[in-house]
Image: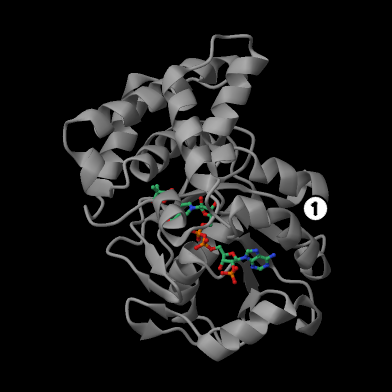
Amino acid sequence: MGIQSVSFIGLGALGILFGSQMNLSLPKGALTFVADETRVKKYKEKGVYANEQFCDFDYRTPESIEKPVDLLIFSVKADGLDAAIELAKPIVSEHTIILSLLNGISSERILGSVFGEDKVLYSVAQGMDAVKVNNILSYHHMGMICFGDQGAGTISIMTKEVAEFFDRTGIPYEVDTNMLKRQWGKFMLNVGVNQTVAVYRGNYGTIQVEGEPRETMIAAMREVIRIAPYEGITLTEDDLSYWLNVLNQLNAEGKPSMAQDVEAGRKSEVELFAGTVLALYKKHKLAQPTTNQMLYENIQRIDSHSV
Ligand SMILES: NC(=O)C1=CN([C@@H]2O[C@H](COP(=O)(O)OP(=O)(O)OC[C@H]3O[C@@H](n4cnc5c(N)ncnc54)[C@H](OP(=O)(O)O)[C@@H]3O)[C@@H](O)[C@H]2O)C=CC1
Ligand SMILES: CC(C)(CO)C(=O)C(=O)O
């Protein structure tokens, strides 16, 4: 029968982006956005838009969902993950497959420790230039979801089921048999681009041209390459080129999620990025990486004025 029901937790840029695509082909009731009562009320009143189209989403509290869902997608920011996990518990059964679109290298481990590692696939969302202002999402590139099993070289039945579901619902995807490396590659990208664009108050255009911001971004990414082997991951200059190429495709006017947080006065996800890099250098008793240190301090300063 395959995956028949899917819930997102997180009606943000990514939830709207992929949810609106799925909504085009799924029967009514198959796709739900799960939230607490206050959020459900707000979403029903205000609605959301994707590229100027109204999204006819089904907003639900977990209690109002009749049975556990087949696929559960976490699309909250890092500071919302714990509450989202609590909220999700009633709609998870032994058959539920869990995906996390969160950036960073820790959310799958956290989800696995709560729901069981056997339910969680590893994933990264990449290549999108989504910009969300209030309840309106705009994008030129939808990007894709890369996913697969935690263990390298395997393609489980769960992975095949999600691939079949994405085929059916028109979600661009790639199955990767080395997800830890992919996730570290994406981590390297975010450490570079998200933090640099936030600090320089720019957009993708700022780092697509030669100059100080692009040099800063690449220096921060190389600090990830340097620490990766201490965690059992190999990243090379070829990986750096691959991810720089991903960035070159994006609409120059678009911005990473961190820059959008800073502009909206929300707390950033700096702990997922420089916070994690600095902690890893400390863990492995290496001298602190200067570029990430500088970015961390700057973003912390910006965050101190946020709510
Ligand atoms: N934006 C992008 O292009 C990309 C983002 N990512 C990553 O994906 C993750 C999500 O990012 P993004 O979509 O930009 O995030 P947004 O900030 O746009 O959206 C997060 C959403 O989660 C909701 N939320 C927070 N807590 C809860 C909760 N307890 N229950 C239900 N909903 C909750 C928020 O609701 P409310 O607004 O009502 O508070 C908000 O709508 C992040 O880790 C980000 O780094 C990865 C790739 C690309
Ligand atoms: C890769 C990028 C920059 C958008 O695709 C992202 O992950 C983000 O905005 O957080």
Decide: is 300 above or below 111: above
For the N terminus, which image quadrant? bottom right
Q: Residue at x 39, y 20 (%)?
A: 236
Q: How is the image coloured?
A: one colour
Q: Position of residue 259 (x, y in %)?
A: 40, 51
Q: Is residue 56 left or right of residue 71?
A: left
Query: Which residue lies most toward the left here?
Result: 210
Q: Residue at x 29, y 35 (%)?
A: 244
Q: Is residue 103 left or right of residue 193?
A: right
Q: Which residue is mark 1?
A: 115
Report if residue 2 is visible in the image.
Answer: no
Decide: is 295 above or below 77: above
Residue 253 or 25: which is nearer the viewer?
A: 253
Residue 28 or 263: which is nearer the viewer?
A: 263
- Residue type (three-letter) at the residue carrying disc 1: Phe
Q: Residue at x 77, y 62 (%)?
A: 95
Report if residue 285 is visible in the image.
Answer: yes
Q: Position of residue 300 (x, y in %)?
A: 53, 39
Residue 124 or 95: which is nearer the viewer?
A: 124
Q: Residue at x 29, y 29 (%)?
A: 241
Figure disc tally: 1
Decide: is 88 above or below 113: below
User: SS at mark 1?
Assistant: helix
Are there few (<14), some (14-19), or many (20+) residues within 10 Å of tag 1? Answer: some
Q: Is residue 199 left or right of residue 25?
A: left
For the C terminus, which image quadrant? bottom right
